[in-house]
Structures are given as structure tokens and as C-alpha cells.
Amino acid sequence: MAASRDSDKAIRYSVTTTIGSAEGLVDEYVAWLKDGHVQAVVAAGATNAEVLVLEQASGEPVKTVSTYVFPSRAAFDSYVEKTAPALREDGLKRFGGKDVSFSRTIGTCVFAHST
């Protein structure tokens, strides 16, 4: 019974990217996100997206977090099946072999509050 209720909850999908110290790599990556990647994820079913550049200690790699909200598990699964493979391939083509690594987290939204 819980599974059917969870399928109706929003899904929050985040990609954390760790970017090394190569000159201009952070700007290149963020520009790629802003110039079409994020819009493609929204067009594929996300209802909200945001990109953060995290604060870090001096000398530490830069981390970004791109977070997308999908209205349901079905919407997220559709994105994963139909759109994500091409977007991931594009990201690897542009940034694979460079000092960039990716990790993904997926969670069900159980509570949200805003003013």
C-alpha cells in the first residue's frame, strides 16, 4: 500500500558534480547547464530546477549541485527512460576525461514548506 502512495509523491533528483582546478572548467560546466541542459530536463518533466555552486575551502575542488523536482515517480521514470541517456552522453562527451566527477541522489519528498 505504501508503494502506491509513494508513487504520487514528488521526486527530487540531484546531481553533484566535483570539478577540479583546470582553468575555466567550472565556468564551462555551469554555462553548459544554463545554456540548455537544465531546460531539457524541465522539458522532459521536471517542474523545477536549480543549480548551486557550493562554497568550499581554499584549494578544494568546486562542487555544484543541480536539483530537479519531478511531480511523480512516473514522470521521473519517463525522464530516466526517454531523455536522461542522451543528456548523460552529452555530459560525458563534453566533460569525460576532464577533472570532473558526478554522483546522483534520488529521493521522495515527504515534507516541504515555503512562505
Image: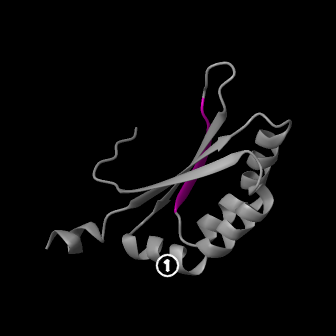
Magenta span covers which residues?
A: 47-54
- Work out whether 103 lies above or below 36: above
Give the residue displayed 66% in from the left and 32% down from the top: 61
Residue 56 in percent (x, y) is at 61, 25
Residue 32: image quadrant is bottom right
Amino acid beneath label 1:
Ser
Binning the other alpha carbons within 10 Å of mark 1 as few (below 14), some (14 to 19) or many (20 upward) gives: some
Nearer to the camera, 76 or 45: 76
Residue 8 in percent (x, y) is at 30, 70
Give the residue displayed 74% in from the left and 57% down from the top: 96
- Work out whether 113 lies above or below 2: above
Give the residue displayed 69% in from the left and 47% down from the top: 100
Q: Secondary structure at mark 1?
A: helix
Residue 49 in percent (x, y) is at 57, 54
Farthest residue to the front: give it: 97
Residue tagged by mark 1? Answer: 78
